[in-house]
């Protein structure tokens, strides 16, 4: 009614102008048209009323079928959907405006054309809007579409709890906590509704899971802005340890025969724990709804979130999210739930491998997160941050400090304000604050590192062993290789974490009476040792992963694992890991022929010469590693050469022609350059340099000069690097020292192998002559 009156006033005002006097919008229609106008307005009211009935019919159908048995707050979300409210306003205004115009006509008042034009526009909007709103209403067969208001409610609660003007207001913080808690409870109800068969959807639980992850991401970036004593935090009882209780409370309890009441402490993880529980529910429903492929797609989001939390040293929050993902995915990895119901065996297998890998990825991202935090500590001026925090309460909530550190600085800030009020100046020295603040950050850094490392073995070694027991060598291989990446990153990033720890230790003041500086306890794992142990375990999987031909549509687990095992065997031999090195070497030896067959099959389109050159490489690799085993045995008299030699003895006895084949293969290989063999030689060069073993270039050929011998062993001396480094591959040593004895008499070893044999022989001859001379001198 007010709107129509406003339009009439505007039209009348325009009608007083020369332009408006002749404009149909500003004057009433002629009297002979009033009957048509009334019919038009009546039709508009009828159309709007019909549309209103259709709208409520649609809402009623959805509410009485889909949402008939859901909690009240979920039904309220559906009914209070904002676009529906906007559409209802348009329809109601159309009906009310039309009625007002009809009533005014009964009092002989003809409305201006502007009112009729606006009424027509409203009718058009109502007609078009019904199409849009009906489509949107039918979208609500997917309950995840209702979560928009809940996300806004949570975001508003976080904003109130973190805003500079409201975070110190106890009432506002309590209200923000309550509203956020209610929104999360409604989220839980939404997830629970999806468990029913009628509301089960393949996309809804995945959408809700993504939304929950975004809630934690948004919250974690602002969490440090909330005072640690805020009413935003939930309160949980903390009970007293009676074996360490202080004397006064113990005596009071004993004399009165009463207990000690628990203290209520802030729960800084209430939101993350709530979201973690919801994630477990929503992901479980996703897999029950056969949306496994879509659910696996959020693994990257889970991993990135865990990494972001670890980067802020929020390890408990990170582990809560990671554990939720792990618990759900671990149960479905070996089941068809990880793929669509119509998926073929190929797709199912790929999804299961992706699921197995995703069980390790969050820990990898968390490790990268703590490395980021360590680098940030190295670049920050913590002393200035601590001073600013205690001097200005607002500055405390600008830096990204761990919660225990903020709690301590809040207390210091309040104490310093009291000092200034009482003493007129600050009494607490900066070095005291720096010491305690840095100590708190060391505790957070070490707790984050320890929290990650404690989970590594359970997420990697134990899981690989379980997949092996279940006969899933493919999943064991995928998990194991993901574990190798994680272990490598632990070893690679540990120095920067130790540097950050050392940087924080520079704020330590040994004169303080309550030092108690946190020390890193013994690491729950040695990444180098675990890496080697994992490679040995994976080497046992090679026979089960054999394939006749590479399929580019699937991961090449056999080829990748073979290369990893070759590299692991090489490093184990150089590092003196005898048991693991021998196990991996035996796996390489056992796979020589199988790898050759695979290469021949994969390269069947190449010409025979190029194909054969590549196909002999597994044999050259096995001989090359044998040469390294022999060389390392000569270094210090230990290593795996003796069992390696026995393996070759058995192999050549069973295959008498193999020795000649190996010699022919070596002849082909000597004319080509293989990058991996060069890389191994570079590693060997570094080992020689570390041990100070080199050959004097000026006396390169003067082997008779004992003072110039690089090493007591003739073999080590022959391979000691000169200015050009080591230039002979170690498979040549294997041929010169071992294989020659299994070849027919007079067989040509090849020019380069014979050069190696001659060099060793000269050092050996010189060594024998030196021993004879020493013996003669002794007799004399």
Image (tube, rainbow, N blue to C red):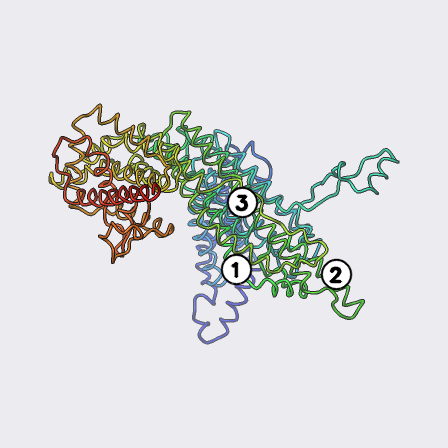
Residue count near mark 3 (Cα–Cα under 10 Å), binned few <14, some 14–19, many ≥20: many
Mark 3 = which residue? Answer: 318
Near-viewer residue (536 or 779): 779
Mark 1 = which residue? Answer: 378
Judge whether residue 452 can be spotted in this image. yes
Which of pointers 1 and 3 lies earlier in the amino acid sequence?
A: 3
Mark 2 = which residue? Answer: 415
Whether tag 2 and tag 3 are in contact, CB under 8 A, the answer is no
State which mark lies toward you, 2 or 3. 2
Up/down of 550 relative to 777, above or below: above
Residue 29's disc number: none
Counting from the top left corner in percent of width and height, residue 650 is at: 26, 25
Q: Secondary structure at mark 1?
A: helix
Q: Secondary structure at mark 2?
A: helix
Up/down of 369 relative to 530, above or below: below
State which mark lies toward you, 1 or 3. 1
Q: Give the left or right position of residue 256, taking residue 262 as reference.
A: right
């Amino acid at each position: 009614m007010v709107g129509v009156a406003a339009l009439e006033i505007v039209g009348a005002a325009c009608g007083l102008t020369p332009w408006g006097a002749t404009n149909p919008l500003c004057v009433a229609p002629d009297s002979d048209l009033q009957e048509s106008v009334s019919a038009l307005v009546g039709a508009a009211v009828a159309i709007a009323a019909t549309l209103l009935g259709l709208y409520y019919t649609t809402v009623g159908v959805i509410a009485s079928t889909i949402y008939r048995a859901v909690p009240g707050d979920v039904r309220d979300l559906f009914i209070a959907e904002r676009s529906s409210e906007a559409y209802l306003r348009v329809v109601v205004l159309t009906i009310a405006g039309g009625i007002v115009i009809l009533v005014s006509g009964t009092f002989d008042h003809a409305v201006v054309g502007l009112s009729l034009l606006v009424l027509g526009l409203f009718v058009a909007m109502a007609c078009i809007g019904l199409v849009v709103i009906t489509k949107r209403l039918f979208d609500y067969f997917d309950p995840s579409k209702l979560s928009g208001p809940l996300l806004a409610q949570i975001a508003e609660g976080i904003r109130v709890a973190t805003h500079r003007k409201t975070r110190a207001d106890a009432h506002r913080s309590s209200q923000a906590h309550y509203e956020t808690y209610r929104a999360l409870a409604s989220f839980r109800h939404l997830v629970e509704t999806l468990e029913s068969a009628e509301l089960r959807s393949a996309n809804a639980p995945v959408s809700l899971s993504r939304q929950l992850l975004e809630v934690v991401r948004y919250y974690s970036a602002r969490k440090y802005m909330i005072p640690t004593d805020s009413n935003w935090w939930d309160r949980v009882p903390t009970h007293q340890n009676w074996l360490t209780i202080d004397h006064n409370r113990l005596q009071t309890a004993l004399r009165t025969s009463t207990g000690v009441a628990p203290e209520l402490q802030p729960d800084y993880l209430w939101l993350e724990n709530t979201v973690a529980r919801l994630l477990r529910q929503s992901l479980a429903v996703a897999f029950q709804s056969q949306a496994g492929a879509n659910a696996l797609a959020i693994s990257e989001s889970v991993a990135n979130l865990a990494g972001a939390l670890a980067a802020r040293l929020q390890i408990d929050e990170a582990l809560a999210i990671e554990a939720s993902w792990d618990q759900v995915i671990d149960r479905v990895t070996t089941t068809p739930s990880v793929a669509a119901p119509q998926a073929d065996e190929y797709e199912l297998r790929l999804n299961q491998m992706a699921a197995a890998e995703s069980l390790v990825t969050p820990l990898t991202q968390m490790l990268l997160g703590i490395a980021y935090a360590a680098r940030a500590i190295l670049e920050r001026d913590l002393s200035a941050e601590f001073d600013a925090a205690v001097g200005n309460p607002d500055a405390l909530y600008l830096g990204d400090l761990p919660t225990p550190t903020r709690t301590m600085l809040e207390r210091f800030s309040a104490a310093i304000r009291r000092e200034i009020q009482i003493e007129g100046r600050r009494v607490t020295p900066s070095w005291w604050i720096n010491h305690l603040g840095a100590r708190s950050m060391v505790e957070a850094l070490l707790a984050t590192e320890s929290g990650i490392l404690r989970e590594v073995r359970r997420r990697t070694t134990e899981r690989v062993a379980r997949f092996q027991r279940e006969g899933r060598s493919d999943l064991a291989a995928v998990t194991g290789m993901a574990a190798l990446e994680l272990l490598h990153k632990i070893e690679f990033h540990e120095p920067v974490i130790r540097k950050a720890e050392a940087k924080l230790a520079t704020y330590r003041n040994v004169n303080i009476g309550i030092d108690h500086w946190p020390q890193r306890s013994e690491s729950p794992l040695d990444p180098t040792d675990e890496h080697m142990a994992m490679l040995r375990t994976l080497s046992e999987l090679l026979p089960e992963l054999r394939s006749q031909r590479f399929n580019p549509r699937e991961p090449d687990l056999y080829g990748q694992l073979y290369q990893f095992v070759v590299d692991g065997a090489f490093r184990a031999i150089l590092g003196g890991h005898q048991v693991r090195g021998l196990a991996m070497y035996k796996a390489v030896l056992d796979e020589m022929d199988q790898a050759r067959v695979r290469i021949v099959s994969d390269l069947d389109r190449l010409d025979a010469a190029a194909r054969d050159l590549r196909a002999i490489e597994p044999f050259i690799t096995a001989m090359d590693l044998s040469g390294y085993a022999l060389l390392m045995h000569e270094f210090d008299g230990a290593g795996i050469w003796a069992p390696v030699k026995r393996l070759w003895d058995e192999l050549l006895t069973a295959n008498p022609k193999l020795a000649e084949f190996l010699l022919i293969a070596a002849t082909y290989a000597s004319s080509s350059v293989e990058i991996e063999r060069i890389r191994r030689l570079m590693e060997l060069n570094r080992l020689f340099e570390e041990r100070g073993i080199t050959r004097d270039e000026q006396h390169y050929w003067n082997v008779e000069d004992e003072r110039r011998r690089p090493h007591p062993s003739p073999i080590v001396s022959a391979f000691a690097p000169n200015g050009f480094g080591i230039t002979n591959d170690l498979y040549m040593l294997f041929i010169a020292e071992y294989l020659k004895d299994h070849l027919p008499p007079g067989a040509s070893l090849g020019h380069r192998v014979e050069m190696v044999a001659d060099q060793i022989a000269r050092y050996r001859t010189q060594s024998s002559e030196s021993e004879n001379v020493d013996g003669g001198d002794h007799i004399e």
